[in-house]
Amino acid sequence: MLLSSQDHPFRFMHYRHQPEGMRLTAFLAAVGLAAGLLAGCTAPAVSSTPVEQPAVQVPLGVTYSPVALDPLKKGMTTAEVIALWGQPEKQQHMHHDAGAADIWIYHHVISSYQRQVATSTQLVPVFDSFTNATKNVPEAVYSQERVQITQTAELLIIKDRLIEWKVTDESSKMLLN
């Protein structure tokens, strides 16, 4: 049921004065436009590669696995740590209250994938069926982005023993084109 123009929140629209066929045409055009926008029918194909690829294990010079964090135990000797993870990528010497200490640093890429991201917009001509004219509308332009997640493990070694460790993950992103 249609409201009178005094009760209707959009008083400037007088639906009761429009023919039924015109209201149906406007409704169908709006539904078609919404369906087209949701389907992304005007987006050009940028690449034949999928938007997101599954994570890939990519070693970065060190041959330990992130799963190897579980076997670490406080009090392990440096020989036991090297047997599990190999030589550290980097060592930092420091002074600790208990004596000379080392921080052993390991890096490992645990995930690497590409995806499409919107990087800019461009004006695209579109035919407006209501005004029978062509107008320009903004459309997203996509580029490939590489996302890499790197895990850094820092082990505190004092007097040839593993005292404690911490692990951090860092994400880096780089546009490819």
Image (cartoon, rainbow, N blue to C red):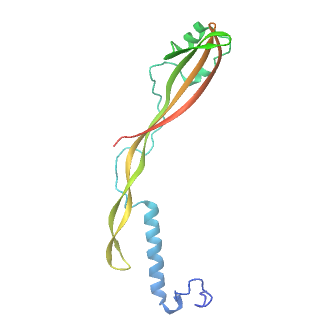
Q: Which of 167 and 49 is in front in this view?
A: 167
Provide residue 71's location: percent of width, then percent of height. Answer: 63, 17
Q: Is residue 12 left or right of residue 175?
A: right
Q: Is residue 167 left or right of residue 175?
A: right
Compared to residue 4, the image places residue 68 above or below, namely above
Q: Which of 99 and 166 is in front in this view?
A: 99
Provide residue 89's location: percent of width, then percent of height. Answer: 48, 17
Residue 139: name its quadrant.
Answer: bottom left
Q: Quadrant of the C terminus?
A: top left
Q: Outermost residue toward the bottom? A: 17
Q: Is residue 130 left or right of residue 34?
A: left
Residue 50: name its quadrant.
Answer: top left
Q: Quadrant of the N terminus?
A: bottom right
Residue 158: name its quadrant.
Answer: top right
Q: Which residue is drawn at 36% across and 40% down?
A: 176
Q: Is residue 97 left or right of residue 172?
A: right
Q: Residue at x 61, y 21 (%)?
A: 69
Q: Which of 144 and 37 is in front in this view?
A: 144
Compared to residue 94, the image places residue 6 above or below, namely below
Provide residue 153's location: percent of width, then percent of height. Answer: 56, 23
Q: Which residue is drawn at 68% across and 15% down?
A: 74
Provide residue 48's location: percent of width, then percent of height. Answer: 35, 46
Count the marks: 0
Compared to residue 47, the image places residue 74 above or below, namely above
Q: Residue at x 41, y 42 (%)?
A: 145
